[in-house]
Image: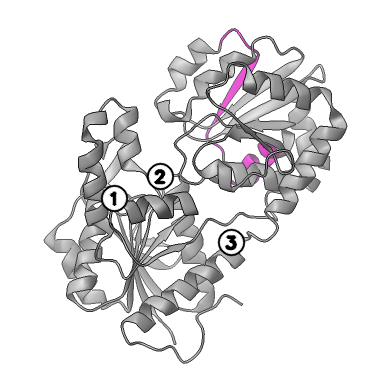
Amino acid sequence: MKLRIAIVTESFPPVFNGVANSVVRVLETIKDLGHEAIVIAPTTPGEYFNGFRTYQVASVPVFQFQLGLPSAAVSKILSDFRPDLVHAASPVLLGAQAVTWAEKNGVPSVAVFQTDLAAYAERYGFKVLRPMMDKLMASFHAGATINLAPNTEVKSYLQNIGLKNIEIWGRGVDLELFHPNRKATAEVKVLREQLAPNGEKIVGYVGRLAAEKRVDRFAEFSDIKNTVFLIVGDGPERAALETKLAKINVKFVGKQTGEDLANYYAAMDAFVHFGTEETFGQTIQEAQAAGATVLAPNSGGPKFLIESGKSGFLIDPELKNAYSNQLGIVLADEELSQRIAEGGRRSVLNKSWQANNSKLFEFYSKALAMHGVETAEPLQVA
């Protein structure tokens, strides 16, 4: 059965983040399987993306995100396309309209929880809004046939705010692009010589430079010698971070993608993430796949990606010197670092995008069946 899938997403290229990347990967699978799709989003790179028609809608900036606005035009686009299924990626106002449209028109929908806006409200000084934000989030997802959570902790949160029909769906990782073998390539050897000309260890971070990521905590590593700190990414906090981290040997290289991003991962001896509000932690998986030893907080999404002492280290984010002490141990013990890095790689070997999206299509099949649509054969990725 060939499907017509309407993807309504709060983030899409040229914006680059976890939501946008996930949608791009889903579209790749849809194309490989020969299904039809459209994309409705606040940003688009053009009228078509990878052969799929895209529709850009009006939006406003909120918490450093472009928030898509609902409109009659969105309903018309959906009605004209006549989808068999609606996929709402990290729904807010725009995604909620798509879920409501699907419910009113008897079309199955799958809503993917990816951004905890209630937590962002707290982070940016609006703690009093948390109960209201929780209710809003519940309303955005309430009409979906199936809601997808990245881990059991988020599933419990969604249940607590009143949602039902919740399944677990994580994120995939490109196991070929991010691979330890890349460390031995000429390109990465040259990159390491440029970044660490005196043979220093390289400790990195990849991601948005925003307040909730707590990249400023790299300052805690000021006493660690013979080390270069590498910050890959961009965002509103970059200027402030360049000032605050000026006392350590830190290099900011901006946003990187594709082969360049993979080379930076491969150049790292260790990868550190301080953010405690991650619903998932995609860059953690990428660093594990690339063969870097990962340190991340024992909070949120990282708890479900790392088995501490085997595939990385989970750090108490409130314990003074916990990060610097563990990083010092890792950098001083080559055997330990290599063993943990190998464990990290093994932990993601079953998380390719192909395997991940095969699971998504199982949920598509289930949503269709819940609406009385039985597919002739399973909707699976070969």
N-terminal of the pair, mark 1 or mark 2, is 2
Q: Provide the secondary structure element on which disc 1 rests.
A: loop
Earlier along the polypeptide chain: callout 3 or callout 1? Answer: 1
User: 150 and 160: which one is in front?
Assistant: 160
Label pair 1/2, CB-CB below 8 angstroms: yes
Q: Which of the image's four quarters has the N terminus?
A: bottom left
Residue ID for mark 3 = 353
Does the magenta segment cover residue 72?
no
At label 2, counting other C-alpha atoms closer than 10 Å, the crowd grade (few under 14, some 14-19, many 20 or more) is: some
Across and down, in percent, residue 27 comes to: 46, 65
Task: Count residues near mark 3 (Cα–Cα under 10 Å), then give few for <14, some for 14-19, many for 20+.
Answer: many
Q: Pointer 2: what residue? A: 15
106 relative position to 259: left or right? left
- Magenta part of the protein: which range? 246-265
* Of 337 and 72, the residue lying toward us: 337
Q: Residue 295 appears in which quarter of the rendering?
A: top right
The spot of residue 348 in percent (x, y) is 67, 54
The residue sitting at the bottom extreme is 376
Q: Gap between marks 3 and 2, in whole Å?
A: 20 Å
Residue 174: percent from left, percent from top = 63, 55
Q: Residue furthest right?
A: 335
How far apart marks 3 and 1 lie (CA) works out to: 25 Å
